[in-house]
Amino acid sequence: MLLGTVTAGSYIHHVPARILVVDDDSDMCDVLASELKTCGFDVRTEQTADAALLAAAQTDFDVVITDLQMPEVSGAQLCARMSVNRPDVPVIVVTAFGSMDTAIAAIRAGAYDFLPKPFPPEQLTLIVERAVRHRSMRQEIARLRDRVALAGRRRDAGGILGDSLPMRELFDLIDRVSDSETSILVTGESGTGKELVARQLHAQGRRARQRFVAINCAAVPQTLLESELFGHVKGAFTDARTDRKGLFVEADGGTLLLDEIGDMPPGFQPKLLRVLQDRRVRPIGSDRETDVDVRIIAATNHDLEDDVAQGRFREDLYFRLNVIRLRVPPLRARGADILELAHHFLLRFADDSGKPVREIAGPAAERLLGYGWPGNVRELENCIQRAVALARFEHIVVDDLPEKIRDYHIAQVIPRTDDPAELVPIDEVERRYILRVLDVVGGNKSQAARILGYDRKTLYRRMSKYGIAPDTAPPAAVASSG
């Protein structure tokens, strides 16, 4: 990887980083410029602090490298003026007078780092690349912070955040179907925010002024589910001491979310199907039916097509619910949305706890971007809540994150190396990419085949060839043991 090309999770700085070198010694300027250009940086040199300040006012440099000992205006003074005029640009101070006092003076003046002469060229390029990454990450965090505020105003009713391509496609579908009266099936992994999508559909639709009622079908035993949904009359069973309206009646005129519909007991499914078909409910113990006008949204993390094939879910009920399907993408497929959501949670938990935490440090943000998030948005929310509780500064640092996130590593599909010994055969690249696609789509073979450009039979043949179990989708990213 060229040192002038910076990668930070899903955020990539594609343009060669611009470096300003400032030294009154023209030979030193030439030496530093030559080394940095060899590593892929775009370099400009100046021999006075005044000329450097003028150049920085006209050009957006990513890093400034300055000698400490210069006539008229010193490198420390240049640092101080840069920190006022361009606080976003990190300054690296280079000097032959290396001591703790000069280092402290440079840092206090606003320097990002300090490098005493003499130094090996690779040490300079390493520090410069780190400074470029630092600035890129700070810019990304600032941009996402602004977007959080904008998205919060734009989608205040549903609380959905995100600007990645998968989320823009989801928002587009929500906008297109929110006024529809047909049943909607929201699918996605646990923790992706399916209930938020359902609430957004309700908030944008014609029924927004009416009630939104939700029930978790997996959390209610079958013996109570009928009473919860349809209601009962006094004396219908032992504990029925009064009449009770069911959730269908409570949601009349509004929206009813049947969450975790894939876990609904098979014995109750025919009763639900009848109500959806007739739009009438009969409370337990009653001989009278009540008309209900309810928009149905169902949500599940199951592959209902597979459940239908295995006889665990009624096919006619599946078709009744799956008129329009909205797929909520997993967090690992949403790129920089991770930082947007993280900052949203940070502000919320900081305000709740009264702590002055307002930022996520660059290295911590890189860890968040690199992690696989098997628990999706819910896991990220818990992570940030913990980080805010542990934070000792006004920003979250790597040590505030859970150990599994601090130590997480991603298996590269294509190794980023120029060493021929580390490159892999094309079959290994294909194997890794199939695993990555399966991971992103949550093991959905039909969707994976479409992305890969295969039919399902070809996908299964490739999986068999590479020893990928047909009933699992091993993640492409694994946590290290260290």
Image (cartoon, rainbow, N blue to C red):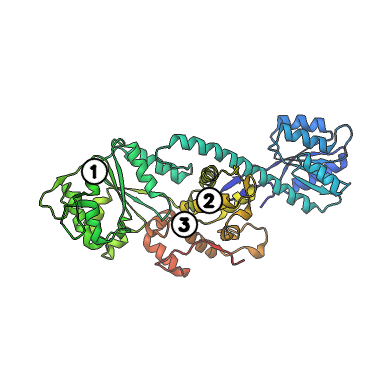
Write down the residue under mark 2. Answer: 385
Coordinates of residue 471 in the picture (x, y in percent): 39, 67
Q: Residue furthest left?
A: 287
Please state which amino acid type lies under the numbered disc 3.
Answer: Gly
Is the residue marked by circle 1 packed among few (<14), some (14-19), or many (20+) residues within 10 Å? many
- Nearest the viewer among 83 and 226 is 226
Per the image, label 1 sits on a secondary structure element best described as loop
- Nearest the viewer among 357 and 134 is 357
Residue 156 horizontal side relative to residue 313, left or right: right
Quadrant of the image for the C terminus? bottom right
Distance (Cα) linking label 2 and label 3: 15 Å
Is the residue marked by circle 2 packed among few (<14), some (14-19), or many (20+) residues within 10 Å? many
Please say if the residues under marks 2 and 1 sit with CB atoms less than 8 Å apart: no
Please state which amino acid type lies under the numbered disc 2.
Answer: Gln
Residue 9 horizontal side relative to residue 98, left or right: left
Looking at marks 2 and 3 on the same chain, the residue that comes earlier in the sequence is marked by 3
Coordinates of residue 410 in the picture (x, y in percent): 57, 59
Q: Residue furthest front?
A: 241
State whether residue 21 appears in this view. yes
Mark 2 or 3: the one toward you: 2
Write down the residue under mark 1. Answer: 294
The disc placed on residue 375 is: 3
Per the image, label 3 sits on a secondary structure element best described as loop
